[in-house]
Image (cartoon, rainbow, N blue to C red):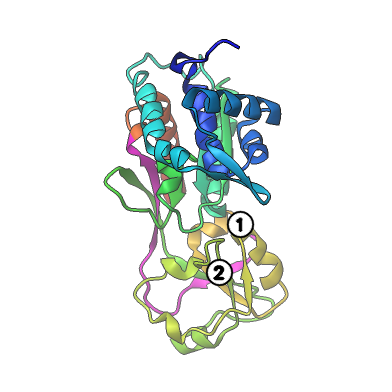
Amino acid sequence: MSKIDFMELDGKVLRIFLTILEESSVSKAADRLGVTQSAISHTLGKLRQILGDPLFVRSGQGLTPTERALSLKEPVQQVLDNMRALTEERPFNPLSERMDIQIATNDMPRELIFPDLLREARAEDIRLQLEFIPSGVPDPDLLRSDRCQLMLTPLPPDGPDIFQKRLVTSPLMVFYDAAHRDPPQDWQAYCDSDHVEVRFADGRNARAVMRGVDQSQIRAPIVTLPHFNAIPPFVKGSTLISTDTALMKLGPLASLDCAPLPFASDPVTIYMVWHQRSTNDPAHRWLRRRIETIATMLQT
């Protein structure tokens, strides 16, 4: 068999390596990249031969990276970032190339911004392909690892390599069913109400956006849900309440009644967040401008 040297490495091979590293599974990496498992396995075999290391060993239902694989994570990501930078100053025409982007966000920004953006793009014959993952309380490693290229969140992660821009600001409101109750009239009535709350996969809850109040006095939630779209069926026909931004009335909580909080609380700001590698990419800049335009219309 002829020897394979480092010249066999390319951006696709390196991207597959990082995806296997992140997913700890050939099948999950294949699903994420939209290719067959055999293609992933073939590429992994090539990498093992080039690098002279097994890279991953089977452990239970998944794969465990070797020390060599772990040591390659940052250098490989840097190589991919440098390859991407080669195209930053290219002439860009959104009609001439397909844009694939992974976005981390929760229900409200996803529903209020991206359906309009996609409809506009398709009407203009722009080939835009979007994939969404839940952001919860987002981790900057989602951006650093290129698992997503953009976040929309009220809780932007920090880091010298993480960029952010304010999109919209919205007050917090109480959502309820007016056929079954009135909104709470003061702080004590609010604390004593039965609450519905969203808790993300990492264990943190959506109440993190409520600032300037003593949350320890608020009664523990009656119902805890994984996302905002699940709230209305529980609130409808009950005396339960949910606390969310006023923008939710335009999206996931449109079927519920709402009223201002009966106490002072800071408004919530939604930020657009990205990694520094994407700052000067012309396709990414185009997408950010389109998102800002739609967000501006929401604020009016």
- Residues drawn in magenta: 254-276
Name the amino acid, label 2.
Cys
Q: Position of residue 225 (x, y in %)?
A: 63, 67
Q: Position of residue 221 (x, y in %)?
A: 58, 79
- 96 displayed left or right of 35: left
- Amino acid type at mark 1: Pro
Residue bearing the label numbered 2: 258
Residue 94 higher or lower than 18, as above or below:
above
Closer to us: mark 2 or mark 1? 1
Q: Are marks 2 and 1 in contact (CB under 8 Å)?
A: no
Give the spatial CA distance, label 2 vs label 1.
13 Å
Q: Which residue is mark 1?
A: 252
Q: Which corner quadrant of the image does residue 222 belong to?
A: bottom right
Side of 41 where 243 appears, left or right: left
Q: Secondary structure at mark 1?
A: loop
- Element on which disc 2 rests: strand
